[in-house]
Image (cartoon, grey):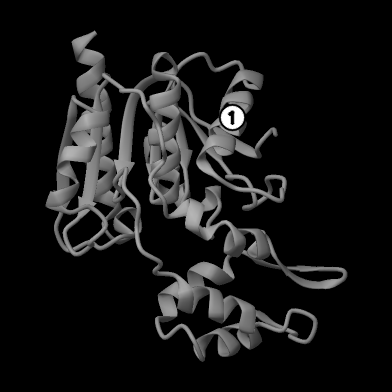
Amino acid sequence: MFLHTHSTGCGQPLVLLHGLFGSYENLAGIARALADQWQIISIDLPNHGQSPHSDTMDYHSMVADLHSTLDKLGIAQCALLGHSMGGKLAMAFALAYPAKVSALIVADIAPVSYSRRHQQVFAGLNAVTLNAITSRGDADKQMAEHIAEPGVRQFLLKSLEKTEHGFRWKFNLEVLAQCYDELVSAPAADGVYPGPVLFIKGADSDYILPEHRPQIMRYFPAAQAKIINGAGHWLHAEKPAAFVKLVRDFLLSQHTKI
């Protein structure tokens, strides 16, 4: 499967991978900030954004999709930056194809399995009567019965689009629900990625915990970690300047070592 991509900037390639329910546009601010020194390739993951839909979704198939997409783009090696589910995909890809990854940046996720934590989001999304609403405001009101946080609803509404046949979600809601247990599982792999890895954690987030360190070091023996204070799971949106500085400093430090 060839995934939808958006490219900007020039230099060594840096591939950006968004999280669950998102699209490449979620990391657009990061792309703009880093395009002065790198070629930024932002990708819509399968069943998201403008990428094709399929009946299955797991990390093995997404690694294959990412590999074929990079091949078609003529990218032999790149740095990878992934947030949340995109971070899991980035880790799985680096473990499967270590020679193709010059550096790895993982934003607020660990290579472990997580408990279900999106039940209210799915309930809110399923509450939207797509064939009856006339505006995003209508959808927002329906979701609000299940999703209290306005910021979460606004994030989800970015993937609601109006077509000539009415409103539709850009992401494949049915398949995301069916495959959810796969998506919150650890990206199974037997390999090791020996290259440079930076984990960036939001201080107020519980996605990366001290007990995850042995699993991280098992797969990524050269891993280092940084924490952004005052940020939660959406650290790149909450503290964009701090996030960009960590990414830039890390990538530039790798260039100086070569």
**Residue 201, x across and y down, in percent:** 22, 51
Q: Amino acid at mark 1?
A: Ala
Q: Please tell me which residue lies in front, 213 or 6.
A: 213
Q: Residue furthest top?
A: 258
In the displayed structure, does residue 162 sit left or right of residue 68?
A: right
Q: Taking 188 as reference, is 6 left or right?
A: right
Q: Identify which residue is drawn at 48% across, 52% down.
A: 183
The image quadrant that residue 222 belongs to is: top left
Asked where in the image residue 216 lies, by quadrant, the reply is top left
**Rendered location of residue 51, percent (x, y):** 68, 45
Q: Is residue 174 above or below residue 153?
A: above
Q: Residue at coordinates 61% horizontally, 37% vertically from top-left? A: 5
Q: Is residue 221 above or below residue 205?
A: above
Residue in front for this viewpoint, 77 or 59: 59
Residue 212 visible in the picture: yes
Q: Report the residue at 22% width, 61% height from top.
A: 206
Above or below, 118 relative to 240:
below
Q: Residue at x 17, y 63 (%)?
A: 230
* Residue 190 pos. (x, y %): 37, 27
User: Which residue was labeled with disc 1?
Assistant: 64
Query: Under tag 1, what secondary structure?
Result: helix
* Quadrant (top left/top right/bottom left/bottom right) for the N terminus: top right
102 versus 128 height, above or below? above
Left or right: residue 18 compared with residue 137:
left
Give the camera-side residue of 240 and 222.
222
Q: State the count of labels.
A: 1
